[in-house]
Image (spheres, rainbow, N blue to C red):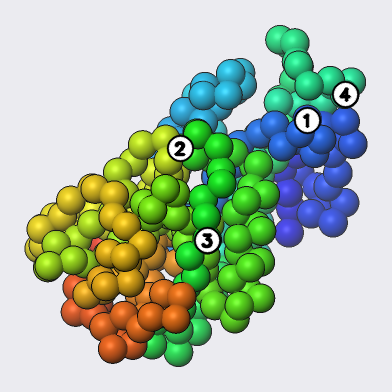
């Protein structure tokens, strides 16, 4: 498993960065996770554009164009051709502001740290796929720029750990009684037959999967990008979450409340099927 670190490929276990890397000391960096289907990177351009947008948002001078980053991603794949991860895993890309003597402020001209390597496929059991997952709600105490895909993930990891401790799959942030998103997913509900999800503003990460699902959903259902409350979530006809690695995943329990009698609903099932078909077409093209 060869990892790319600032222009060089090396065994993942041997790959190291400086203890004065600003990513390590301050979480001063950004990242992307891009899913591989049959060795092809799904929605690559969208992920790379989001990476560039995240870079600009934190004034990080990422000296790469989308095309240069694309080439880099392909190089990671070709260097790992015999690794099953290069077929059905995902590609992790991270950029930090780079290595510099420790100081909160930074100066121009630090060389960014760019790393890329392959992650194994995330397995979601058939049981979870068919029965749906349970989630808990937690207060959203994050900062005001959740649209930036920063490596600063402390609230997200603490939330996910809380979910794990509670024996559930995901924790969902609620900010001022508005449901924003999961710790690593976007969340949708069906209310009065209408699909609702939080608008892609500074309170959530605008997921690439969210975008694909919205497009597919608009072909079949009424859809609104509008915040909904924790009460709406409890009373929803259906709930599902989306992400690059989870795709469309039904939620059948929120806190201690069952959704749709504990069954994945019709809309969720349909959308997951549409998403699978969309991917099947991508694989063929
Ligand atoms: N929100 C958060 C906080 C996330 O970490 C993720 C996963 N990266 C998502 C939403 C879903 O985004 P995507 O569909 O682009 O994977």
Find residue 180 and report its horizontal and vertical position in percent: 40, 51
206 left or right of 121 in image: left
Q: State how far apart marks 3 and 4 are (Cα).
A: 34 Å
Q: Earlier in the sequence, mark 3 or mark 4?
A: 4
Q: State how far apart marks 1 and 4 are (Cα).
A: 8 Å
Q: Residues within 10 Å of mark 2 (few under 14, many from 20)?
A: some
Residue 269 figure quarter? bottom left
Determine whether the residue tagged by mark 4 lies in a helix, strand or loop. loop
Q: Quadrant of the N terminus?
A: bottom right
Q: Earlier in the sequence, mark 3 or mark 2?
A: 3
For residue 147, the mark is 2
Name the residue located 76 percent from the left edge and 26 percent from the top edge: 98
Quickly name the residue at label 1.
Answer: 22
224 left or right of 278 in image: left
**On screen, residue 23 above or below 278:** above
Residue 219 figure quarter? bottom left
Name the residue located 88 percent from the left edge and 35 percent from the top edge: 18
């Amino acid at each position: 498993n060869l990892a790319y670190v600032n222009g060089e490929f090396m065994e993942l276990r041997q790959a190291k960065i400086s203890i004065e890397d600003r990513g390590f000391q301050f979480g001063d960096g950004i990242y992307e996770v891009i899913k591989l289907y049959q060795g092809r990177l799904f929605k690559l351009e969208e992920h790379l554009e989001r990476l560039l947008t995240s870079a600009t948002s934190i004034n990080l001078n990422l000296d790469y164009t989308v095309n240069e980053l694309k080439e880099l991603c392909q190089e990671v794949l070709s260097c790992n051709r015999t690794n099953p991860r290069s077929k059905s895993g995902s590609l992790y890309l991270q950029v930090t502001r780079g290595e510099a003597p420790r100081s909160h402020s930074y100066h121009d001209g630090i060389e960014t740290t760019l790393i890329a390597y392959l992650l194994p496929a995330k397995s979601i059991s058939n049981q979870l796929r068919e029965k749906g997952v349970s989630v808990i709600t937690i207060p959203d105490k994050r900062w005001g720029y959740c649209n930036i895909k920063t490596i600063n993930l402390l609230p997200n990891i603490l939330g996910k750990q809380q979910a794990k401790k509670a024996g559930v799959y995901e924790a969902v942030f609620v900010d001022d009684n508005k449901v924003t998103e999961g710790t690593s997913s976007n969340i949708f509900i069906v209310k009065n037959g209408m699909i609702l999800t939080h608008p892609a503003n500074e309170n959530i990460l605008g997921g690439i999967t969210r975008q694909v699902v919205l497009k597919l959903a608009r072909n079949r259902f009424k859809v609104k990008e509008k915040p909904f409350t924790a009460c709406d979530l409890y009373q929803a006809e259906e709930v599902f979450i989306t992400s690059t690695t989870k795709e469309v995943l039904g939620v059948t329990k929120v806190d201690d409340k069952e959704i749709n009698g504990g069954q994945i609903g019709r809309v969720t099932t349909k959308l997951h099927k549409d998403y699978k078909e969309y991917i099947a077409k991508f694989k063929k093209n």
